[in-house]
Each structure stands twice: as C-alpha cells, then as structure tokens.
Amino acid sequence: MVPRNCTLKTYKNTTVPEFKISSAFVAYASPDSTYAVTRRMVDSAKKEILIGIYDFSADYMKDLVLNTMKRGVTVSLMLDIDSDAEQKVFDELKKFGCKAVPAPSCAAKKNRYFPSSHEKVIVIDGTWTLVQSGNYSDNSIPFNEKDGGDPQHFVKGNRDMGVAIESKRLAGFFTKILRADITLELGGDTEALAGRPARPEPDLVEAVPKLLPADLFPSQKFNPAAPIRVRPVLSPDNYMDVVPDFLRSAKKSIYIEQQYIRSTQTEIVVLLEAIKGARQQNSKLDVRIILGKLFSVKDVAKERKNLDTLRAQFGLRLGDHIRYIDVNRFVHCHNKLVIVDETAVLVSSQNWSSSAVSKNREAGLVIDYPQLAKYYAGIFESDWKTGLRKIPIPGKKTTITPEAVARGNFVEVRAADYQEV
C-alpha cells in the first residue's frame, strides 16, 4: 500500500458541463451482472478502449483486454498502481501493446496531483461510457458469465453498481478528462522520490458468504422517450457543488449505499447536514443507508463512535435509518450509490470521506431518469431487507491457516476493496 499523504502538485479544476441524452442506458450491478455487461461492451469494441481505474488485479479481466488487443483494438490504461499484483498486470498489458500509464496520484513515480486516482471509467469507441463504483478486482467484478448470475454456479462478491451510456458527447467529455490526467502524469520532470516507502499490502482472507443474495438482478437496458439530464460529478472538481443540493432536493426519500461514512470529516458533515435539512423540510422523508462490513475488530470502537455521531448530530439511527450489508450474502458493500425520490440517481466512485469528495480523482454521474432510478432502488430494497441491524463484528482471528484456506470456501479480499481513500 502506498501512503496517500504525499506532497501534491497544483491541479486546476475543470468546468463540468451537463448533458441531455436520448440514446441508450444500461444499468448493472455486482455481483450479478457487471462482468457480463463489461464483457459484452468490450467484445463489441472495434477501434479503441480507454480505461481509467483504481485497481486492476483480476486475471480474467487482464485476459479479456489482451484478447481485445489481439483483435486489433487499441487499449489505453491509466492505473493507480498500488501493489505488486497490479504492477504485474500493468507490465504484461504494456508488453503486449496496451498504452499503459500510471495515474498521477501519490502512487506515481513522476507527477502527483491527487492522493488517489480512484475513478472507474471506461470509454469504448468514443461512443459508450461506463461509470461505476467497482474496480477490476475479483470481488467487484466477479466472474459471473451469465447476466444476472446462475444460482447453481454463482460467484459471490461485493455489492457495486454501474451504468453504461451511449453518447458521443459524454464519451468525448470523459475521454478529455482521462487524456488530461494522462498528460499530467507524462508531463514535467521526474521528482525525487526518496522517502516514499511502500507499506506491505495486507493479505485478507475471508470466508465466502454462505448464502446467495436474496434476489439476483440482470442488467437492464433503457431507451428514453425524451432527453435525459446527465450531470458528471467529478472530484475534486464539482462533487461538493452538486451533491449537497442533490440531497437537499429530496421530497420523499434518500437511499444510500456506501462503503463507509466518515461523519466527523468536514465535507461529509456538509453532506449529512444536507440530508438533515431535507428531513427538516419533509418530516416523513424516508432516509435509509446501507454500509459495508468492518474488516478488523479494531475498527468496531471507531464505528460505534461513528454511529453515535450519526444519531446525535443527524438523527440517523441504527436499524431504522442505517443497516449493514448482509455479510452472509456479500463479501462487502463497496457501492457509492445515492437515489433521491426514486427519480434520480448518483452512480459514482466517491466514498464518503473528505479525500474522496474533495481531493482524489473520482468520477460519477447524477442521472435524472425515474425508470433508471427505480432499477437501482429495487436492488437497494433487496439489500435493505436482508441488511444487518447491528454492527457485524469481524472475526477475532487475524490470520487463517494455510490448511484452512486449502479446504476451500475462502476468498481473498484486496486492500483496494476496503481501504479508506
């Protein structure tokens, strides 16, 4: 793991436009359909794929990209390299012709503009743009080849969500953003990097969840009858300009799935105050939040304090307003979802930490499209129904013996799937 508190060069925020889009939208989610949708999209590529992503460690995703390049498709990759496993994937893809560049984050050896380059954006043939919460890790894009998953051969993983949109203008915008970040990394002089120690990446081995998700959700394609308002939401550029007002606009409901909520950090207080303000204006506002699991027993005391703050300062109570993802069904909740009034949805990479919403490179979309929002709301309701009303206490054992792992029913959890960024 690379420390994320390095000295940064000055980044100039970009102006973020809105879009009106009349063409196709495809909604998808992990563990159910992300791989199937991604494979279809990648297999459809004829000329070029541009990928900006935080973690790329799943071997089958590497193979998918390699096979795509064999068909003559140009692939460009900007990766926040944070482990030996990622470096190996990066080097192999580059060896076989991928235009691979490190992201301009604290992990870079050249130019550092962001603590983390944590976006997950894929642009295909300058036409389709995929924006999602999940990395190319085994748990965030599990190898479920059937769209919606095969219950008899289901690969369990994280809850994540994404959206693919057919729009040359939107694809052009994200291409411009990713290319600009690549230019940041390639430009300038190499900095002296003494004193940038890499911490060993923790090896976490977790038991495979015993149960399937309560419901399995195939992807869904939407063809709007009228133009849909789509607002890119980038960090550090405009997340805090857009999302507080988005939350305050709620009249009926706010549904959130988040890996965690850092309730005392400055920018997150602003987001929580926006929810509080919406509740004050609408006493019957339905606010429900699903959080991810804890991976260390050492985090339990901190999480209890966090819940105390959410209750005392913002009126959000465990059980009524907050639940945890069912760890018997999912490896983790890695999602970053916000649904307002079941009419508009934010699909993004931003966790609710100050770094994520104001310092990292992150990307998301606020989409004002009721049918699309209802797709994600259906998944949320299923997760809420099975959500845990108490903090899921992690196992007290810090290590699992190789003999136990060899017996099966364990899954490796990469740091990129749980670390705070």
Image: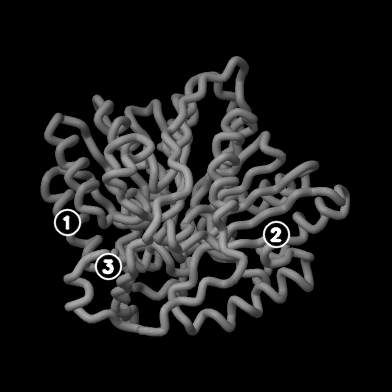
113 left or right of 262 in image = left
415 to 158, vertically: above or below: below
Tell which circle, 2 or 1, labels the residue nearer the N-terminal end: 1
Say whether residue 236 is visible: no
Residue 219 x, y percent position in the rendering: 43, 33
Q: Amino acid at mark 3?
A: Ser
Determine which residue is flagged by label 1: 91
Circle number at residue 83: 3
Look at the numbered disc 1 and give the secondary structure of its residue. Answer: helix
User: Can you name the residue that lies furthest to the top here?
Assistant: 225
Image color mode: one colour
Look at the numbered disc 3 and give the secondary structure of its residue. Answer: loop
Tell which circle, 3 or 1, labels the residue nearer the N-terminal end: 3
Question: Callout 3: few (<14), some (14-19), or many (20+) C-alpha neighbours within 10 Å?
Answer: many
Q: Amino acid at mark 1?
A: Asp
78 to 394, vertically: above or below: above
Residue at x 21%, y 48% (from the top left corner):
60
* Residue 403 figure quarter: bottom left
Determine which residue is flagged by label 2: 321
Mark 2, mark 1: which one is toward the viewer?
A: 2
Tell which circle, 3 or 2, labels the residue nearer the N-terminal end: 3
Residue at x 37%, y 41% (from the top left corner):
34
Look at the numbered disc 2 and give the secondary structure of its residue. Answer: loop
